[in-house]
């Protein structure tokens, strides 16, 4: 039985009515890591791992939500929204951000299930927030744009779950297009679709199975280091608002004034913004090999300068780097401290490589990594007609 069928069946059992069904995908990011909150470029895509939401409106203001995979049922109302890092707090954060805009919504019955690996760096939290926001927008006809919904999701993660994240993840979940990456300029929020198709190479995520528990506190610290660098430079250069506005030459002028650690973090980000620009041109030109070598550079920048990798991620990327015939690109993906690497692998090699990598990884870490080939898919969307009250 498909995930969608399971979610719909459960919904009908619980709520005795026909739901409207939404799909909310996770995301990958080809390149452009830790650049979104620095006004830089990112290159994400929505993927074929997603949440399924079965939803119906209610006549009262209660949100009655059942998480199928966790077998947890939570009820809340707009006057008892709480902060925390449970899945329900993310939904509450979205609801709060919508209410802050003085928009009127009623309650919802919801069952959701997911094929996104939790903590795998595919951004399950942004997909959860985006899917819920999208459902409210459709069922209560709020007329919010995709970008407004992305900002709402972003603020939910910040204000209700304490992770001061950038716009990339909800943007990608909401704006994805089949077989395309997106180049998003996180300063202007302009974006373009970059078609991705290859006979030769495929995209595979390799999950270290390390859950990134340090992620949100360390993430916020990295963001503060970048802001500290910007603040020092801004004193003398009032047109500098983010690291996007800082060239490498300008950063070097401030080398003595900045903490070594802050300098390294800023240096990585400025390089990564430039790499992402280059990668977009390479993707347009169809030069995946050159793009792949930029991915390796990103990884070692994230590991050595930005300091957000871990032994397991470095191990997988090192292995990939020793077999560049098969792996033309590999790097850690997302916020860091665990989760997946994203790899561009020669199609014929993947099966043979899988066993070899699993056994090498097992010898060191006593567990096997999981492999997930991914396809690029449409962003959050409706799969059935809307059933209003
Ligand atoms: C997490 C955040 C994003 C982005 C990445 C790093 O996924 O949610 O906003 O900053 O980390 O690129």
Image (tube, grey):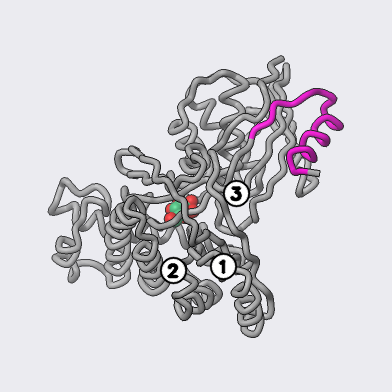
Spatial separation of the CA atoms under disc 1 and disc 2: 13 Å
Question: Badge 1 is on which residue?
Answer: 348
Left or right: residue 258 versus residue 313 is left
Left or right: residue 212 versus residue 328 is right
Predominant SS along the magenta part:
helix
| First in residue order: circle 2 vs circle 3 | 3
Q: Nearer the viewer, mark 2 or mark 3?
A: 2
Q: Nearer the viewer, residue 163 or 313?
A: 313
Is residue 14 found inside the magenta-colored segment of the image?
A: yes
Question: Badge 3 is on which residue?
Answer: 124
Spatial separation of the CA atoms under disc 3 and disc 1: 30 Å
Left or right: residue 219 versus residue 301 is right
Vertical comparison of 132 with 32: above or below: above
Left or right: residue 16 versus residue 135 is right
Q: Which structural element holds mark 1?
A: helix
Could you say where residue 247 lies in the image, as x and y percent from the top left?
19, 58
Spatial separation of the CA atoms under disc 2 and disc 3: 27 Å
Question: Badge 2 is on which residue?
Answer: 328
Bounds of the magenta segment: 2-22
Q: Residues within 10 Å of mark 3 (few under 14, many from 20)?
A: many
In this rendering, does residue 231 appear at all? yes
Q: Nearer the viewer, residue 363 or 247?
A: 363
Residue for point 62% across, 60% down: 372
Q: Quadrant of residue 291?
A: bottom left
Q: Which structural element holds mark 3?
A: helix
């Amino acid at each position: 039985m498909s995930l969608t069928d399971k979610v719909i069946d459960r919904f009908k059992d619980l709520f005795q009515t026909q739901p409207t069904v939404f799909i909310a995908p996770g995301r990958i990011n080809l390149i452009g890591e830790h650049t979104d909150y620095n006004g830089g470029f990112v290159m994400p895509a929505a993927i074929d791992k997603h949440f399924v939401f079965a939803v119906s409106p209610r006549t009262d203001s209660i949100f009655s939500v059942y998480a199928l995979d966790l077998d947890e049922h939570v009820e809340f109302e707009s006057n008892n929204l709480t902060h925390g890092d449970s899945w329900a707090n993310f939904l509450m954060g979205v609801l709060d951000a919508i209410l802050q805009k003085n928009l009127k919504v009623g309650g919802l019955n919801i069952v959701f299930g997911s094929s996104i690996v939790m903590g795998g760096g595919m951004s399950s939290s942004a997909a959860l927030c985006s899917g819920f926001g999208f459902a409210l927008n459709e069922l209560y006809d709020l007329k919010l744009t995709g970008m407004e919904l992305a900002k709402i999701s972003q603020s939910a993660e910040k204000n209700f779950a304490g992770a001061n994240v950038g716009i990339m993840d909800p943007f990608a979940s909401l704006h994805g297009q089949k077989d395309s990456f997106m180049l998003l300029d996180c300063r202007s929020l302009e974006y373009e679709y970059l078609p991705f198709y290859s006979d030769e190479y495929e995209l595979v995520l390799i999950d270290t199975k390390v859950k990134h528990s340090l992620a949100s506190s360390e993430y916020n610290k990295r963001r503060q280091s970048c802001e500290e660098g910007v603040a020092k430079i801004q004193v003398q250069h009032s047109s500098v608002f983010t690291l996007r506005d800082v060239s490498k030459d300008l950063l070097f002028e401030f080398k003595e004034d900045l903490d070594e650690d802050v300098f390294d973090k800023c240096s990585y980000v400025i390089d990564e913004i430039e790499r992402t620009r280059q990668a977009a041109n390479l993707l347009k030109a169809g030069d995946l090999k050159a793009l792949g070598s930029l991915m390796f550079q990103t990884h070692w920048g994230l590991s050595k300068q930005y300091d957000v990798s871990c032994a397991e991620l470095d191990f997988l990327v090192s292995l990939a780097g020793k077999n560049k015939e098969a792996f033309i690109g590999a790097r850690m993906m997302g916020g860091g401290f665990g989760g997946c690497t994203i790899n561009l692998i020669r199609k014929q090699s993947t099966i043979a490589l899988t066993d070899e990598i699993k056994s090498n990884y097992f010898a060191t870490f006593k567990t096997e990594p999981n492999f997930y080939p991914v396809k690029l898919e449409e962003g959050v969307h409706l799969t059935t007609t809307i059933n209003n009250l």
